Image: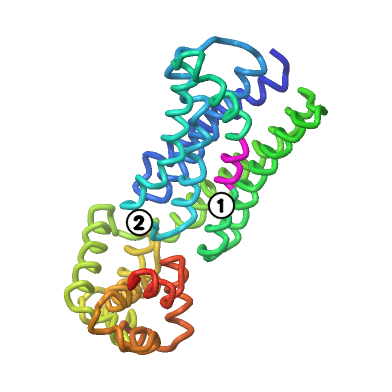
Amino acid sequence: MTWELILFLAAAINGLILSLLFIISASKRKRFLGLYLLMFSITILHYVNYWAQMINPPTAIRWLFVTANWFMPFAFYYYMKKGAKLKHLPYHLIPALAFTIYWAAMSFFIQASLDFLSIMRNVLPWIKIALFVGYGYVIVKTVKFNAINQLFLAAYTSFIIGQIAYFLSLYFGFYTLRLDYIICGGFVLLTYGITYFGEYSFIKERVKPKYSSSSLTKEDGDYLVQKINSVLEQNKYYKDPDFNLSSFAEKLGVPKYRISQALNAFSEKSFSELINEFRVEEAKSRLLLESSSHLKLEAIGEEAGFRNKVSFYNNFKKLVGKSPGEFREEHTQ
């Protein structure tokens, strides 16, 4: 085994370990980052095994090797987009399940069926790239970016570029193993480097110390977050445009800093983000009511608690992925 393969193998093994740290995290978003990193690491292991021809894995392992990167786009989407609904998860699994059916057909169907399946083999890589690009487009359009998110998007984009470069090199006949190493090395360095320094170290070194001196335990924090959500659902304080953290702390009988700590540490959102989520859900409910069909969009936004049209439209688009008008039109057809 060459030194390049040893480095790739070591990187993949470290990636597997890092992915497990995120998967066992209490945070839903971190778990999806862990899933993304796990599938990425399995893909790199597949590359190493392909290059080195180390083992001939059993059928189940071969399926995992070739299917892993079909799970990556939706896992990345759920990590990047706060508030993404888990109830939509089955729809996101459709591409990976469809590829599984194709792979099973390639493995077990009779020879007469192989002509169509062989044609699909040439088309599927571009379908997969289109899937990556499509999710990337949705993320760019719907996610509010900070510096860390931009770095992760760069790593995600590097994987797409690497896949395109690989398939083009095969198609035009200039593929070499050295070129493959360079392409893979690029997105491996970006993905693992940004994950470690941008997420793992960032969270451990910058966020945790902020609350390290706090007496707020996980049990207390989870209870407080549940209580905050329950009180807001029951009383709908968020419908008042002047509603803020200070007034809520007074109603709840809990210090402002404690509410902020609980939300930031145990639900990964600020108080204003939580309130805007409630307001958007309220607006969605009203947009679906036949009795509100005569109301202008701005009026519905005001009834939900938004102070102005811009705030309503921006938050609705960010959380739902479409404007209030598009949402209403889609559900009244």
Q: Position of residue 144 (x, y in %)?
A: 53, 66
Q: Secondary structure at mark 2?
A: loop
Q: Is residue 136 above or below residue 143?
A: above
Q: Main secondary structure of the magenta part?
A: helix
Is residue 283 or residue 41 the one in the foreground?
283
Q: Is residue 282 magenta?
A: no
Residue 196 appears anywhere in the view: yes
Tag 1: residue type?
Gly
* Residue position marked by numbered label 1 in the rendering: 134
* Closer to viewer: mark 1 or mark 2: 1
Is residue 223 or residue 124 the one in the foreground?
124
**Nearest to N terminus: mark 1 or mark 2:** 2
Q: Secondary structure at mark 1?
A: helix
What residue is drawn where x is 57% and y is 28%? 12
Q: Residues within 10 Å of mark 1 (few under 14, many from 20)?
A: few
What residue is drawn where x is 42% and y is 46%? 92
Q: How is the image coloured?
A: rainbow
Q: Residue furthest right?
A: 174
69 horizontally vs 165: left or right: left
Q: Quadrant of the C terminus?
A: bottom left
Q: Is residue 271 above or below residue 63?
A: below
Quarter of the image where one finds residue 230:
bottom left
- The magenta span reads 125-132
54 horizontally vs 300: left or right: right
Is residue 86 or residue 14 the one in the foreground?
86
127 horizontally vs 323: left or right: right
* Residue position marked by numbered label 2 in the rendering: 85
What residue is drawn where x is 23% and y is 84%? 291
Q: Position of residue 77 (x, y in %)?
A: 48, 51
Tag 2: residue type?
Lys
